Image (tube, rainbow, N blue to C red):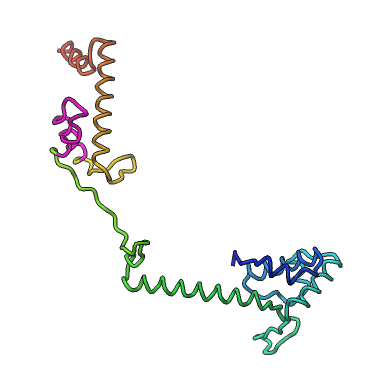
């Protein structure tokens, strides 16, 4: 357990007579109890080492806490076939109740999850908060009319641009990005296509203004000179 309820009123009522040192050691013992979900080991030398209890004053305080709030029970040694007092453990009734409740709740949650899973035999048994199976919607591929209708106000050549868009994504399987992720929204991709094309055309126009020729025109001129 990594969490437990701490009732401040009850704790203060039962520990008001303790010294600050005793209260601190008591909290340490309770937290170890919950964290390990086991009673405290009966060997005091080992227990005190785990709790960093070293001075005689600390040991006396720890002894008092164990005597007042815990009960020592002998632990059965299956190897020796007997109960040995020095293998005993220190139980705390409230901690035992909380751990039992926690374990029962956890077991019921696991059983309920297994039952849901087994009822379907697959991941559809895991329901969302609205109790509907989890589904993944697949994008419906657009036709050229759909694309033209979407981009006609974005470009002066909607039909040619739409055809280029359709041809390109048909050739790559309607995936986008370096990771080749399936396209989720063709409208968004079509808008980006138009914007990129405008950028390409603007770049080509700027290069032509500087050189007076496009790259294609330069290549054609070079071929003519070689003839």
Q: Residue at x 66, y 78 (%)?
A: 93
Q: Which SS does the magenta portion mostly show?
A: helix
Q: Is residue 8 left or right of residue 141?
A: right
Q: Is residue 35 left or right of residue 107?
A: right
| Number of numbered tags placed on the structure image | 0
Q: Is residue 163 left or right of residue 195?
A: left
Which of the 4 image quarters holds residue 4? bottom right
Q: Is residue 188 above or below residue 112?
A: above
Q: Position of residue 30 (x, y in %)?
A: 69, 69
Q: Is residue 114 above or below residue 190?
A: below
The quadrant the C terminus occupies is: top left
Q: Position of residue 157 (x, y in %)?
A: 16, 26
Q: Nearer the viewer, residue 182 or 68?
A: 68
Q: Position of residue 138 (x, y in %)?
A: 24, 51
Q: Nearer the viewer, residue 101 or 204?
A: 101
Which of the 4 image quarters holds residue 65? bottom right
Q: Is residue 73 left or right of residue 192?
A: right
Q: Position of residue 148 (x, y in %)?
A: 15, 34
The quadrant the N terminus occupies is: bottom right
Q: Nearer the viewer, residue 177 or 73?
A: 73
Q: Is residue 138 above or below residue 51?
A: above
Query: Which residue appears farthest toward the bottom when viewing the image?
Result: 81
Q: Residue at x 64, y 74 (%)?
A: 95
Q: Residue at x 32, y 60 (%)?
A: 134
Is residue 165 highlighted in magenta? yes
In the rendered structure, which segment of residues is drawn in magenta?
146-169
Which of the 4 image quarters holds residue 162? top left
Q: Residue at x 74, y 72 (%)?
A: 14
């Amino acid at each position: 357990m990594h969490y437990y309820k701490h009732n401040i009123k009850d704790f203060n009522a039962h520990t008001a007579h303790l010294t600050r040192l005793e209260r601190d050691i008591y909290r340490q013992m309770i937290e170890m109890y919950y964290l390990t979900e086991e009673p405290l080991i009966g060997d005091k030398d080992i227990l005190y080492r785990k709790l960093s209890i070293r001075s005689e004053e600390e040991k006396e305080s720890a002894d008092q806490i164990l005597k007042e709030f815990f009960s020592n029970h002998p632990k059965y040694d299956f190897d020796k076939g007997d109960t040995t007092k020095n293998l005993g453990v220190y139980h705390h009734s409230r901690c035992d109740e909380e751990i039992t409740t926690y374990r029962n709740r956890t077991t019921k949650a696991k059983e309920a999850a297994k039952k849901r899973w087994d009822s379907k035999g697959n991941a559809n048994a895991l329901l969302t908060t609205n109790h509907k199976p989890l589904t993944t919607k697949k994008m419906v591929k657009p036709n050229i009319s759909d694309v033209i209708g979407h981009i006609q106000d974005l470009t002066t050549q909607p039909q040619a641009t739409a055809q280029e868009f359709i041809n390109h994504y048909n050739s790559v399987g309607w995936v986008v990005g370096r990771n080749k992720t399936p396209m989720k929204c063709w409208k968004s991709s079509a808008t980006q296509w138009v914007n990129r094309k405008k950028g390409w055309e603007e770049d080509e126009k700027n290069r032509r203004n500087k050189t007076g020729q496009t790259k294609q025109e330069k290549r054609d001129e070079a071929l003519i000179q070689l003839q």
